[in-house]
Image (cartoon, grey):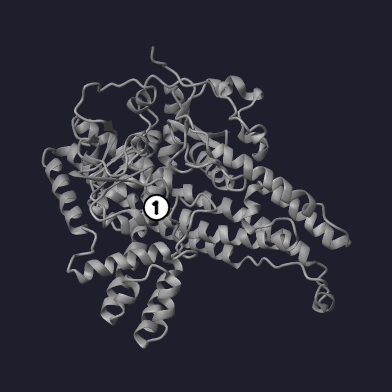
Amino acid sequence: MTDTRFPNPFDVPTPEGCEGWEDLYPYYYLFSEERRELEESKFWFFDGMHHPEVLYPFDTITSESWWVALGEMNSRVYIVPPALGIDHRVLNGRLYISANAITDEAVVGARVAHFMERAGYYYEHWDELYAKWQDKARETIEELKAVEIKPLPEMEDIEVVHSGRGLTSAYDLLVAYNRVVENMHKIWHLHFEFLNLGYAAYLTYFGFCKQLFPDIPDQVVAQMVAGIDVLLFRPDAELKKLAKKAVELGVGDAIRDEPDPDAVISVLEQSDAGQRWIAELEKAKDPWFYFSTGSGFYHHHKTWINDQTFPFSGIADYIRKIEAGESIERPLDDVIAERDRLSTEYASLLDGDDLKNFNEQLGLARTVFPFIEDHNFYVEHWHHAVFWNKMREFGQIFVDAGFFEEVDDMFYLHRFEVEAALYDLIASWGVGTAARGPGYWPKEVARRKVLFAKLAEWQPLPALGEPPEVVTEPFTIMLWGITTDSIQNWLGIDAAEGADYDLSGFAGSPGTVEGVARVILNADELSDVQEGEILVCPITNPSWGPVFSKIAAAVTDIGGMMSHASIVCREYGVPAVVGTGFATQRIKTGQRLLVNGAEGTVKILE
Protein backbone atom coordinates (compact mmCIF):
# COMPACT_ATOMS: atom_id res chain seq x y z
CA MET A 1 0.00 0.00 0.00
CA THR A 2 1.38 3.42 -0.96
CA ASP A 3 1.88 5.89 1.87
CA THR A 4 -0.17 9.08 1.76
CA ARG A 5 2.05 11.02 4.11
CA PHE A 6 5.73 11.47 4.81
CA PRO A 7 7.45 10.47 8.06
CA ASN A 8 6.73 12.46 11.18
CA PRO A 9 9.85 14.57 11.83
CA PHE A 10 9.94 13.25 15.40
CA ASP A 11 10.08 9.65 14.15
CA VAL A 12 13.05 10.10 11.80
CA PRO A 13 15.97 8.22 13.38
CA THR A 14 19.37 9.73 13.97
CA PRO A 15 21.89 8.08 11.60
CA GLU A 16 24.28 5.69 13.30
CA GLY A 17 27.28 7.52 14.68
CA CYS A 18 25.57 10.93 14.49
CA GLU A 19 24.30 11.10 18.05
CA GLY A 20 24.52 14.65 19.39
CA TRP A 21 24.33 16.31 15.96
CA GLU A 22 21.79 18.74 17.44
CA ASP A 23 24.57 20.48 19.39
CA LEU A 24 25.92 21.92 16.12
CA TYR A 25 22.93 24.24 15.68
CA PRO A 26 21.06 26.93 17.65
CA TYR A 27 18.28 25.60 19.89
CA TYR A 28 15.55 27.44 17.96
CA TYR A 29 16.49 25.79 14.65
CA LEU A 30 15.51 22.27 15.78
CA PHE A 31 12.26 20.31 15.97
CA SER A 32 11.37 20.37 19.66
CA GLU A 33 8.89 18.99 22.19
CA GLU A 34 7.85 22.54 23.10
CA ARG A 35 6.47 23.07 19.57
CA ARG A 36 5.65 19.45 18.74
CA GLU A 37 1.95 19.93 18.08
CA LEU A 38 2.62 22.78 15.65
CA GLU A 39 5.53 21.06 13.93
CA GLU A 40 3.68 17.78 13.46
CA SER A 41 0.75 19.61 11.88
CA LYS A 42 2.87 21.18 9.13
CA PHE A 43 4.24 19.91 5.80
CA TRP A 44 8.01 20.33 5.52
CA PHE A 45 10.18 19.87 2.42
CA PHE A 46 13.93 19.62 2.01
CA ASP A 47 15.41 22.86 0.61
CA GLY A 48 17.73 21.19 -1.85
CA MET A 49 17.61 24.28 -4.08
CA HIS A 50 19.49 26.65 -1.77
CA HIS A 51 20.98 24.30 0.84
CA PRO A 52 21.57 20.90 -0.79
CA GLU A 53 24.39 19.86 1.56
CA VAL A 54 24.73 19.38 5.28
CA LEU A 55 24.66 22.81 6.89
CA TYR A 56 27.96 23.85 8.40
CA PRO A 57 27.18 25.38 11.81
CA PHE A 58 28.49 28.82 10.85
CA ASP A 59 26.92 28.71 7.39
CA THR A 60 23.44 28.74 8.90
CA ILE A 61 23.95 32.51 9.01
CA THR A 62 22.82 32.58 5.36
CA SER A 63 19.71 30.46 5.84
CA GLU A 64 18.81 32.18 9.11
CA SER A 65 19.17 35.58 7.46
CA TRP A 66 16.68 34.78 4.70
CA TRP A 67 14.38 32.99 7.17
CA VAL A 68 13.97 36.26 9.07
CA ALA A 69 14.06 38.74 6.19
CA LEU A 70 11.58 36.94 3.92
CA GLY A 71 9.14 36.50 6.79
CA GLU A 72 9.35 40.10 7.94
CA MET A 73 8.74 41.54 4.49
CA ASN A 74 5.77 39.26 3.85
CA SER A 75 4.18 39.51 7.27
CA ARG A 76 5.11 42.90 8.71
CA VAL A 77 6.01 45.21 5.84
CA TYR A 78 4.03 44.46 2.67
CA ILE A 79 1.27 42.35 4.27
CA VAL A 80 1.17 39.78 1.45
CA PRO A 81 -2.45 38.57 1.48
CA PRO A 82 -2.12 34.76 1.18
CA ALA A 83 1.31 34.18 2.70
CA LEU A 84 3.30 34.77 5.87
CA GLY A 85 6.90 33.64 6.08
CA ILE A 86 8.66 30.33 5.49
CA ASP A 87 9.54 28.36 8.62
CA HIS A 88 12.90 26.56 9.01
CA ARG A 89 14.03 23.48 10.91
CA VAL A 90 17.23 21.44 10.73
CA LEU A 91 17.01 17.63 10.84
CA ASN A 92 20.11 15.45 10.66
CA GLY A 93 22.02 18.49 9.39
CA ARG A 94 19.62 19.23 6.48
CA LEU A 95 17.36 22.26 6.15
CA TYR A 96 13.61 21.64 5.93
CA ILE A 97 11.21 24.48 5.26
CA SER A 98 7.46 25.00 5.47
CA ALA A 99 5.49 27.82 3.87
CA ASN A 100 3.01 29.53 6.16
CA ALA A 101 0.07 30.02 3.83
CA ILE A 102 -3.05 31.86 4.98
CA THR A 103 -6.15 29.82 4.14
CA ASP A 104 -8.83 31.87 5.92
CA GLU A 105 -10.44 33.92 3.15
CA ALA A 106 -11.58 36.58 5.61
CA VAL A 107 -8.00 37.11 6.84
CA VAL A 108 -6.71 37.16 3.27
CA GLY A 109 -9.35 39.72 2.31
CA ALA A 110 -8.49 41.96 5.25
CA ARG A 111 -4.84 42.05 4.16
CA VAL A 112 -5.53 42.97 0.54
CA ALA A 113 -6.01 46.72 1.08
CA HIS A 114 -2.75 46.98 3.03
CA PHE A 115 -0.86 45.09 0.32
CA MET A 116 -2.35 47.19 -2.47
CA GLU A 117 -1.30 50.40 -0.71
CA ARG A 118 2.20 49.26 0.23
CA ALA A 119 3.16 47.15 -2.77
CA GLY A 120 1.36 49.58 -5.07
CA TYR A 121 3.69 52.35 -3.96
CA TYR A 122 6.71 50.26 -4.95
CA TYR A 123 5.18 49.26 -8.30
CA GLU A 124 4.40 52.92 -9.09
CA HIS A 125 7.93 54.04 -8.19
CA TRP A 126 9.77 50.87 -9.18
CA ASP A 127 12.55 52.37 -11.33
CA GLU A 128 13.32 55.12 -8.84
CA LEU A 129 13.30 52.80 -5.81
CA TYR A 130 15.24 50.10 -7.64
CA ALA A 131 17.97 52.61 -8.53
CA LYS A 132 18.18 53.47 -4.82
CA TRP A 133 18.28 49.75 -4.01
CA GLN A 134 21.29 49.24 -6.27
CA ASP A 135 23.08 52.08 -4.49
CA LYS A 136 22.20 50.57 -1.10
CA ALA A 137 23.41 47.11 -2.16
CA ARG A 138 26.74 48.47 -3.42
CA GLU A 139 27.14 50.59 -0.26
CA THR A 140 26.49 47.53 1.91
CA ILE A 141 29.18 45.58 0.05
CA GLU A 142 31.61 48.50 0.38
CA GLU A 143 30.85 48.71 4.12
CA LEU A 144 31.73 45.02 4.38
CA LYS A 145 34.95 45.45 2.42
CA ALA A 146 35.93 48.38 4.65
CA VAL A 147 35.76 46.39 7.91
CA GLU A 148 39.33 46.04 9.19
CA ILE A 149 40.19 42.78 10.95
CA LYS A 150 43.56 43.17 12.65
CA PRO A 151 45.51 40.69 14.81
CA LEU A 152 46.01 41.62 18.44
CA PRO A 153 49.46 43.27 18.95
CA GLU A 154 51.94 42.42 21.67
CA MET A 155 51.35 45.95 23.00
CA GLU A 156 49.24 48.84 21.78
CA ASP A 157 50.92 51.53 19.73
CA ILE A 158 52.02 54.57 21.70
CA GLU A 159 49.58 56.65 19.66
CA VAL A 160 46.73 54.98 21.58
CA VAL A 161 48.14 56.69 24.67
CA HIS A 162 49.02 60.00 23.06
CA SER A 163 45.58 60.37 21.46
CA GLY A 164 43.76 59.50 24.65
CA ARG A 165 41.75 56.94 22.68
CA GLY A 166 40.73 54.81 25.65
CA LEU A 167 39.86 51.85 23.40
CA THR A 168 41.91 48.80 22.41
CA SER A 169 42.57 46.39 19.56
CA ALA A 170 40.47 43.80 21.40
CA TYR A 171 37.51 46.18 21.33
CA ASP A 172 38.13 46.79 17.61
CA LEU A 173 38.14 43.04 16.93
CA LEU A 174 34.79 42.55 18.68
CA VAL A 175 33.30 45.49 16.82
CA ALA A 176 34.63 44.14 13.51
CA TYR A 177 33.03 40.74 14.12
CA ASN A 178 29.70 42.31 14.96
CA ARG A 179 29.85 44.60 11.93
CA VAL A 180 30.46 41.66 9.57
CA VAL A 181 27.61 39.60 11.06
CA GLU A 182 25.24 42.59 11.02
CA ASN A 183 26.19 43.25 7.41
CA MET A 184 25.00 39.77 6.41
CA HIS A 185 21.61 40.46 7.98
CA LYS A 186 21.49 43.86 6.30
CA ILE A 187 22.05 42.53 2.78
CA TRP A 188 19.34 39.91 3.26
CA HIS A 189 16.84 42.54 4.36
CA LEU A 190 17.66 44.38 1.15
CA HIS A 191 17.35 41.10 -0.77
CA PHE A 192 13.68 40.83 0.19
CA GLU A 193 12.86 44.52 -0.09
CA PHE A 194 12.04 43.84 -3.74
CA LEU A 195 12.11 40.10 -4.38
CA ASN A 196 8.68 39.07 -3.09
CA LEU A 197 7.13 42.05 -4.85
CA GLY A 198 8.77 40.91 -8.07
CA TYR A 199 7.38 37.42 -7.65
CA ALA A 200 3.97 38.80 -6.65
CA ALA A 201 3.78 40.91 -9.82
CA TYR A 202 4.79 37.96 -11.95
CA LEU A 203 2.29 35.68 -10.21
CA THR A 204 -0.51 38.21 -10.68
CA TYR A 205 0.37 38.38 -14.38
CA PHE A 206 0.60 34.57 -14.49
CA GLY A 207 -2.84 34.15 -12.88
CA PHE A 208 -4.36 36.78 -15.18
CA CYS A 209 -3.03 34.92 -18.25
CA LYS A 210 -4.48 31.67 -16.94
CA GLN A 211 -7.82 33.39 -16.41
CA LEU A 212 -7.87 34.81 -19.94
CA PHE A 213 -6.39 31.74 -21.63
CA PRO A 214 -7.12 28.64 -19.49
CA ASP A 215 -5.10 26.34 -21.75
CA ILE A 216 -2.00 28.53 -22.10
CA PRO A 217 1.16 26.56 -21.14
CA ASP A 218 3.05 27.88 -18.11
CA GLN A 219 6.16 28.04 -20.26
CA VAL A 220 4.53 30.41 -22.76
CA VAL A 221 3.52 32.75 -19.94
CA ALA A 222 7.18 32.82 -18.88
CA GLN A 223 8.49 33.25 -22.44
CA MET A 224 6.49 36.47 -22.82
CA VAL A 225 8.72 38.14 -20.18
CA ALA A 226 12.01 36.62 -21.41
CA GLY A 227 14.75 38.36 -23.37
CA ILE A 228 15.61 40.91 -20.70
CA ASP A 229 19.29 41.49 -20.07
CA VAL A 230 20.20 40.98 -16.43
CA LEU A 231 23.39 41.25 -14.39
CA LEU A 232 23.68 37.49 -13.90
CA PHE A 233 24.69 37.17 -17.55
CA ARG A 234 27.35 39.87 -17.28
CA PRO A 235 30.15 37.68 -15.81
CA ASP A 236 29.77 35.22 -18.69
CA ALA A 237 29.72 38.15 -21.12
CA GLU A 238 33.02 39.33 -19.58
CA LEU A 239 34.56 35.91 -20.27
CA LYS A 240 33.45 36.16 -23.90
CA LYS A 241 34.94 39.65 -24.12
CA LEU A 242 38.23 38.37 -22.68
CA ALA A 243 38.24 35.48 -25.17
CA LYS A 244 37.75 37.89 -28.07
CA LYS A 245 40.51 40.13 -26.71
CA ALA A 246 42.88 37.17 -26.43
CA VAL A 247 42.31 36.22 -30.07
CA GLU A 248 42.65 39.86 -31.14
CA LEU A 249 45.98 40.21 -29.28
CA GLY A 250 47.26 36.88 -30.56
CA VAL A 251 47.61 35.27 -27.12
CA GLY A 252 44.73 32.82 -27.41
CA ASP A 253 46.97 29.74 -27.61
CA ALA A 254 48.57 30.52 -24.24
CA ILE A 255 45.14 30.47 -22.57
CA ARG A 256 43.55 27.75 -24.69
CA ASP A 257 46.20 25.08 -24.11
CA GLU A 258 47.05 25.55 -20.42
CA PRO A 259 44.48 24.65 -17.71
CA ASP A 260 46.42 26.26 -14.82
CA PRO A 261 45.52 29.98 -14.52
CA ASP A 262 48.78 30.81 -12.67
CA ALA A 263 50.82 29.21 -15.44
CA VAL A 264 48.82 31.18 -18.03
CA ILE A 265 49.54 34.47 -16.24
CA SER A 266 53.25 33.61 -15.96
CA VAL A 267 53.47 33.11 -19.72
CA LEU A 268 51.42 36.19 -20.58
CA GLU A 269 53.54 38.42 -18.34
CA GLN A 270 56.47 37.84 -20.70
CA SER A 271 54.95 39.78 -23.63
CA ASP A 272 53.44 43.21 -24.20
CA ALA A 273 50.30 41.68 -25.70
CA GLY A 274 50.01 39.32 -22.75
CA GLN A 275 50.33 42.18 -20.27
CA ARG A 276 47.61 44.09 -22.10
CA TRP A 277 45.32 41.05 -21.80
CA ILE A 278 46.11 40.73 -18.08
CA ALA A 279 45.13 44.38 -17.64
CA GLU A 280 41.74 43.61 -19.23
CA LEU A 281 41.38 40.60 -16.92
CA GLU A 282 42.04 42.75 -13.85
CA LYS A 283 39.40 45.27 -14.95
CA ALA A 284 36.83 42.47 -15.31
CA LYS A 285 37.50 40.91 -11.92
CA ASP A 286 35.84 43.58 -9.78
CA PRO A 287 32.96 42.89 -9.46
CA TRP A 288 32.32 40.22 -12.10
CA PHE A 289 34.61 37.53 -10.64
CA TYR A 290 32.85 37.74 -7.28
CA PHE A 291 30.80 34.84 -8.59
CA SER A 292 30.25 31.52 -6.82
CA THR A 293 30.24 28.21 -8.68
CA GLY A 294 27.66 27.07 -6.12
CA SER A 295 24.64 28.76 -4.59
CA GLY A 296 26.84 31.09 -2.52
CA PHE A 297 25.19 29.88 0.70
CA TYR A 298 28.16 27.76 1.79
CA HIS A 299 31.63 29.01 2.71
CA HIS A 300 33.37 26.26 0.70
CA HIS A 301 31.69 26.99 -2.63
CA LYS A 302 34.48 28.15 -4.91
CA THR A 303 34.31 31.69 -6.26
CA TRP A 304 35.96 32.96 -9.42
CA ILE A 305 37.85 35.59 -7.44
CA ASN A 306 39.49 32.91 -5.24
CA ASP A 307 39.90 30.13 -7.80
CA GLN A 308 40.13 31.19 -11.44
CA THR A 309 40.15 27.64 -12.84
CA PHE A 310 36.50 27.69 -13.92
CA PRO A 311 36.46 31.15 -15.60
CA PHE A 312 39.76 30.42 -17.38
CA SER A 313 38.28 27.14 -18.61
CA GLY A 314 35.30 29.10 -19.96
CA ILE A 315 37.57 31.61 -21.68
CA ALA A 316 39.52 28.74 -23.27
CA ASP A 317 36.31 27.15 -24.59
CA TYR A 318 35.22 30.47 -26.08
CA ILE A 319 38.62 30.95 -27.74
CA ARG A 320 38.28 27.53 -29.39
CA LYS A 321 34.83 28.46 -30.71
CA ILE A 322 35.99 31.84 -32.02
CA GLU A 323 38.94 30.21 -33.77
CA ALA A 324 36.57 27.63 -35.29
CA GLY A 325 34.35 30.43 -36.62
CA GLU A 326 31.44 29.64 -34.29
CA SER A 327 29.24 32.24 -32.61
CA ILE A 328 29.64 32.55 -28.85
CA GLU A 329 26.80 35.04 -28.34
CA ARG A 330 23.73 34.26 -26.28
CA PRO A 331 20.74 34.02 -28.68
CA LEU A 332 19.13 37.16 -27.25
CA ASP A 333 17.63 38.32 -30.55
CA ASP A 334 15.93 34.96 -31.06
CA VAL A 335 14.55 34.97 -27.51
CA ILE A 336 13.21 38.52 -27.96
CA ALA A 337 11.66 37.69 -31.33
CA GLU A 338 9.84 34.69 -29.86
CA ARG A 339 8.77 36.75 -26.84
CA ASP A 340 7.29 39.45 -29.06
CA ARG A 341 5.65 36.93 -31.39
CA LEU A 342 3.88 35.18 -28.53
CA SER A 343 2.75 38.35 -26.74
CA THR A 344 1.45 39.84 -30.01
CA GLU A 345 -0.48 36.69 -30.88
CA TYR A 346 -2.13 36.44 -27.47
CA ALA A 347 -2.87 40.17 -27.34
CA SER A 348 -4.59 39.90 -30.74
CA LEU A 349 -7.16 37.60 -29.14
CA LEU A 350 -8.25 40.31 -26.72
CA ASP A 351 -9.96 43.68 -26.78
CA GLY A 352 -11.36 46.29 -24.42
CA ASP A 353 -10.48 46.05 -20.74
CA ASP A 354 -9.02 42.58 -21.16
CA LEU A 355 -6.46 43.87 -23.66
CA LYS A 356 -5.70 46.93 -21.53
CA ASN A 357 -5.22 44.83 -18.39
CA PHE A 358 -3.14 42.22 -20.24
CA ASN A 359 -0.77 44.91 -21.52
CA GLU A 360 -0.51 46.48 -18.06
CA GLN A 361 0.15 43.17 -16.31
CA LEU A 362 2.70 42.13 -18.93
CA GLY A 363 4.40 45.52 -18.74
CA LEU A 364 4.69 45.34 -14.94
CA ALA A 365 6.00 41.76 -15.09
CA ARG A 366 8.70 42.84 -17.56
CA THR A 367 9.56 45.84 -15.39
CA VAL A 368 10.06 43.82 -12.20
CA PHE A 369 11.61 40.77 -13.81
CA PRO A 370 15.25 41.98 -13.91
CA PHE A 371 15.34 42.26 -10.12
CA ILE A 372 14.25 38.63 -9.77
CA GLU A 373 17.64 37.70 -11.21
CA ASP A 374 19.82 40.78 -10.53
CA HIS A 375 19.51 40.53 -6.75
CA ASN A 376 21.21 37.14 -6.96
CA PHE A 377 24.43 38.67 -8.26
CA TYR A 378 24.53 41.45 -5.66
CA VAL A 379 23.69 39.23 -2.68
CA GLU A 380 24.50 35.53 -3.04
CA HIS A 381 27.52 36.10 -5.28
CA TRP A 382 29.23 39.50 -4.91
CA HIS A 383 28.38 40.11 -1.26
CA HIS A 384 28.80 36.55 -0.04
CA ALA A 385 32.15 36.10 -1.81
CA VAL A 386 33.42 39.12 0.15
CA PHE A 387 31.73 37.89 3.35
CA TRP A 388 33.32 34.42 3.39
CA ASN A 389 36.75 35.91 2.76
CA LYS A 390 36.23 38.39 5.62
CA MET A 391 35.34 35.55 7.96
CA ARG A 392 38.51 33.73 6.92
CA GLU A 393 40.47 36.70 8.25
CA PHE A 394 39.01 35.91 11.68
CA GLY A 395 39.80 32.24 11.10
CA GLN A 396 43.46 33.12 10.49
CA ILE A 397 43.63 35.05 13.76
CA PHE A 398 42.29 31.98 15.57
CA VAL A 399 44.79 29.70 13.81
CA ASP A 400 47.65 32.01 14.83
CA ALA A 401 46.41 31.83 18.44
CA GLY A 402 46.24 28.02 18.40
CA PHE A 403 42.43 27.74 18.52
CA PHE A 404 42.21 25.94 15.16
CA GLU A 405 44.56 23.99 12.93
CA GLU A 406 43.11 25.32 9.66
CA VAL A 407 41.40 28.61 8.78
CA ASP A 408 38.16 26.94 7.64
CA ASP A 409 37.89 25.01 10.93
CA MET A 410 36.08 28.08 12.23
CA PHE A 411 33.03 27.21 10.10
CA TYR A 412 32.39 24.12 12.26
CA LEU A 413 31.36 26.59 14.99
CA HIS A 414 28.10 28.46 15.00
CA ARG A 415 28.39 32.24 14.90
CA PHE A 416 27.47 32.50 18.60
CA GLU A 417 30.26 30.04 19.43
CA VAL A 418 32.69 32.06 17.32
CA GLU A 419 31.77 35.15 19.32
CA ALA A 420 32.40 33.19 22.53
CA ALA A 421 35.76 31.99 21.23
CA LEU A 422 36.62 35.55 20.29
CA TYR A 423 35.88 36.65 23.85
CA ASP A 424 38.06 33.83 25.17
CA LEU A 425 40.85 35.15 22.91
CA ILE A 426 40.62 38.80 23.92
CA ALA A 427 40.25 37.95 27.61
CA SER A 428 43.47 35.95 27.41
CA TRP A 429 45.18 38.81 25.57
CA GLY A 430 43.96 41.30 28.13
CA VAL A 431 44.89 39.46 31.33
CA GLY A 432 48.04 37.76 30.06
CA THR A 433 47.14 34.14 30.85
CA ALA A 434 46.33 31.19 28.61
CA ALA A 435 42.98 30.98 26.85
CA ARG A 436 40.94 27.78 27.09
CA GLY A 437 40.34 27.69 23.32
CA PRO A 438 43.65 26.07 22.18
CA GLY A 439 43.03 23.14 24.50
CA TYR A 440 39.31 22.90 23.76
CA TRP A 441 38.52 23.72 20.13
CA PRO A 442 40.98 21.54 18.13
CA LYS A 443 39.60 18.38 19.79
CA GLU A 444 36.01 19.56 19.41
CA VAL A 445 36.46 20.50 15.74
CA ALA A 446 38.02 17.08 15.06
CA ARG A 447 34.96 15.44 16.65
CA ARG A 448 32.61 17.60 14.61
CA LYS A 449 34.40 16.78 11.35
CA VAL A 450 33.78 13.06 11.94
CA LEU A 451 30.16 13.77 12.84
CA PHE A 452 29.75 16.02 9.81
CA ALA A 453 31.12 13.34 7.45
CA LYS A 454 28.61 10.81 8.80
CA LEU A 455 25.71 13.27 8.42
CA ALA A 456 26.74 13.77 4.79
CA GLU A 457 26.15 10.05 4.18
CA TRP A 458 22.47 10.33 5.17
CA GLN A 459 20.09 10.55 2.21
CA PRO A 460 17.66 13.36 3.12
CA LEU A 461 13.96 12.58 2.87
CA PRO A 462 12.24 14.82 0.29
CA ALA A 463 9.57 15.87 2.78
CA LEU A 464 8.15 15.40 6.27
CA GLY A 465 4.61 15.35 7.64
CA GLU A 466 1.17 15.46 6.12
CA PRO A 467 1.10 16.93 2.59
CA PRO A 468 -1.70 19.33 1.71
CA GLU A 469 -4.47 17.95 -0.50
CA VAL A 470 -3.66 20.63 -3.05
CA VAL A 471 -0.56 22.86 -3.10
CA THR A 472 -1.68 26.47 -3.59
CA GLU A 473 1.12 28.57 -2.04
CA PRO A 474 2.43 30.39 -5.14
CA PHE A 475 6.09 30.92 -4.21
CA THR A 476 6.46 27.23 -3.32
CA ILE A 477 5.17 26.26 -6.76
CA MET A 478 6.99 28.81 -8.91
CA LEU A 479 10.41 28.76 -7.23
CA TRP A 480 10.85 25.34 -5.64
CA GLY A 481 8.58 23.41 -8.00
CA ILE A 482 6.61 21.87 -5.14
CA THR A 483 3.24 20.86 -6.60
CA THR A 484 0.55 18.31 -5.87
CA ASP A 485 2.00 16.13 -8.66
CA SER A 486 5.61 16.35 -7.43
CA ILE A 487 4.51 15.36 -3.92
CA GLN A 488 2.64 12.37 -5.35
CA ASN A 489 5.82 11.47 -7.20
CA TRP A 490 7.86 11.61 -3.99
CA LEU A 491 5.34 9.31 -2.31
CA GLY A 492 5.73 6.80 -5.12
CA ILE A 493 2.29 7.41 -6.56
CA ASP A 494 2.90 7.26 -10.31
CA ALA A 495 0.12 9.28 -11.88
CA ALA A 496 1.53 8.63 -15.35
CA GLU A 497 1.98 4.85 -15.28
CA GLY A 498 2.46 3.53 -18.79
CA ALA A 499 3.42 6.95 -20.12
CA ASP A 500 5.97 7.23 -22.91
CA TYR A 501 8.64 8.78 -20.68
CA ASP A 502 10.71 7.89 -17.65
CA LEU A 503 10.83 11.20 -15.78
CA SER A 504 8.59 14.24 -15.72
CA GLY A 505 9.00 17.70 -14.28
CA PHE A 506 8.37 21.32 -15.18
CA ALA A 507 8.67 22.39 -18.80
CA GLY A 508 11.44 24.84 -17.98
CA SER A 509 12.61 25.86 -21.47
CA PRO A 510 11.24 24.79 -24.87
CA GLY A 511 12.83 22.46 -27.40
CA THR A 512 13.33 18.74 -27.97
CA VAL A 513 16.84 17.25 -27.95
CA GLU A 514 18.35 13.77 -28.07
CA GLY A 515 21.83 13.35 -26.66
CA VAL A 516 24.20 11.77 -24.18
CA ALA A 517 23.78 12.42 -20.45
CA ARG A 518 26.46 13.92 -18.24
CA VAL A 519 25.51 13.63 -14.55
CA ILE A 520 27.12 16.37 -12.43
CA LEU A 521 26.62 16.39 -8.65
CA ASN A 522 28.78 19.44 -7.84
CA ALA A 523 30.53 22.32 -9.56
CA ASP A 524 33.96 20.66 -9.35
CA GLU A 525 32.80 18.18 -12.00
CA LEU A 526 31.78 20.83 -14.56
CA SER A 527 35.07 20.47 -16.42
CA ASP A 528 33.91 16.96 -17.40
CA VAL A 529 31.01 18.34 -19.47
CA GLN A 530 31.59 17.84 -23.19
CA GLU A 531 30.19 19.76 -26.15
CA GLY A 532 26.64 18.68 -27.03
CA GLU A 533 25.95 16.65 -23.88
CA ILE A 534 22.77 16.84 -21.80
CA LEU A 535 23.56 18.21 -18.35
CA VAL A 536 21.84 16.28 -15.53
CA CYS A 537 22.31 17.85 -12.09
CA PRO A 538 20.52 18.60 -8.81
CA ILE A 539 20.21 22.30 -9.74
CA THR A 540 22.13 24.66 -12.00
CA ASN A 541 23.83 27.81 -10.74
CA PRO A 542 24.03 31.20 -12.48
CA SER A 543 27.83 31.13 -12.73
CA TRP A 544 27.68 28.08 -14.97
CA GLY A 545 27.13 30.38 -17.98
CA PRO A 546 30.03 28.96 -20.04
CA VAL A 547 28.51 25.48 -19.67
CA PHE A 548 25.21 26.62 -21.21
CA SER A 549 27.11 27.45 -24.37
CA LYS A 550 28.26 23.80 -24.58
CA ILE A 551 25.28 21.68 -23.55
CA ALA A 552 22.35 20.54 -25.70
CA ALA A 553 19.82 20.48 -22.83
CA ALA A 554 19.52 20.49 -19.04
CA VAL A 555 17.63 18.24 -16.63
CA THR A 556 17.47 19.04 -12.90
CA ASP A 557 16.14 17.39 -9.76
CA ILE A 558 14.94 20.66 -8.26
CA GLY A 559 13.20 23.84 -9.36
CA GLY A 560 10.03 25.37 -10.74
CA MET A 561 9.09 27.64 -13.63
CA MET A 562 10.77 30.69 -12.06
CA SER A 563 13.83 28.95 -10.62
CA HIS A 564 17.20 30.22 -11.79
CA ALA A 565 17.67 27.03 -13.81
CA SER A 566 14.50 27.65 -15.84
CA ILE A 567 15.20 31.34 -16.37
CA VAL A 568 18.83 30.87 -17.42
CA CYS A 569 17.99 28.02 -19.81
CA ARG A 570 15.28 30.08 -21.50
CA GLU A 571 17.67 33.00 -21.94
CA TYR A 572 20.37 30.76 -23.43
CA GLY A 573 17.87 28.97 -25.67
CA VAL A 574 18.68 25.60 -24.03
CA PRO A 575 15.82 23.08 -23.66
CA ALA A 576 15.25 22.20 -20.01
CA VAL A 577 13.14 19.98 -17.79
CA VAL A 578 13.41 21.03 -14.13
CA GLY A 579 12.07 19.67 -10.84
CA THR A 580 12.10 16.00 -11.89
CA GLY A 581 12.90 14.94 -8.33
CA PHE A 582 15.10 11.96 -9.16
CA ALA A 583 17.01 12.63 -12.38
CA THR A 584 20.48 12.37 -10.83
CA GLN A 585 19.48 9.06 -9.20
CA ARG A 586 17.77 7.51 -12.24
CA ILE A 587 20.13 8.65 -15.02
CA LYS A 588 23.74 7.57 -15.52
CA THR A 589 26.45 9.41 -17.45
CA GLY A 590 26.65 8.06 -20.99
CA GLN A 591 23.00 7.11 -21.36
CA ARG A 592 21.14 8.55 -24.35
CA LEU A 593 18.19 10.75 -23.42
CA LEU A 594 15.30 12.35 -25.22
CA VAL A 595 14.52 15.66 -23.49
CA ASN A 596 11.24 17.40 -24.32
CA GLY A 597 11.46 20.86 -22.81
CA ALA A 598 8.01 21.82 -24.06
CA GLU A 599 6.25 18.88 -22.39
CA GLY A 600 8.55 18.60 -19.35
CA THR A 601 9.47 14.95 -19.98
CA VAL A 602 12.67 12.90 -20.19
CA LYS A 603 12.93 9.48 -21.83
CA ILE A 604 15.95 7.25 -21.17
CA LEU A 605 16.71 5.66 -24.56
CA GLU A 606 19.55 3.43 -23.36
Instruction: Give percent across and percent down for residue 283.
Output: 41, 75
**Which quadrant would the N terminus be assigned to in this image?**
top left
Residue 597 seen in the current view: no
Instruction: Give percent across and percent down for residue 565.
Output: 33, 46
Q: Is residue 117 above or below residue 275?
A: above
Instruction: Give percent across and percent down for residue 365.
Output: 30, 46
Which of these two is toward me, 596 or 192?
A: 596
Query: Which residue is located at x 68 percent, y 57 percent?
Result: 405
Residue 566 falls left or right of residue 606: right
Query: Which residue is located at x 66 percent, y 46 percent?
Result: 414
**Which quadrant would the C terminus be assigned to in this image?**
top left
Q: Where is residue 423, by image quadrant?
A: bottom right
Residue 71 falls left or right of residue 311: right
Query: Which residue is located at x 17 percent, y 40 percent?
Result: 355
Which of these two is toward me, 18 or 210?
A: 18
Residue 591 seen in the current view: yes
Going by the numbered disc 1, the residue's amino acid type is Glu
Residue furthest top in the image: 1
* Residue corresponding to mark 1: 525
Residue 351 falls left or right of residue 30: left
Label 1: how many Cα within 10 Å (few below 14, some 14–19, many 20+): few
Q: Secondary structure at mark 1?
A: helix
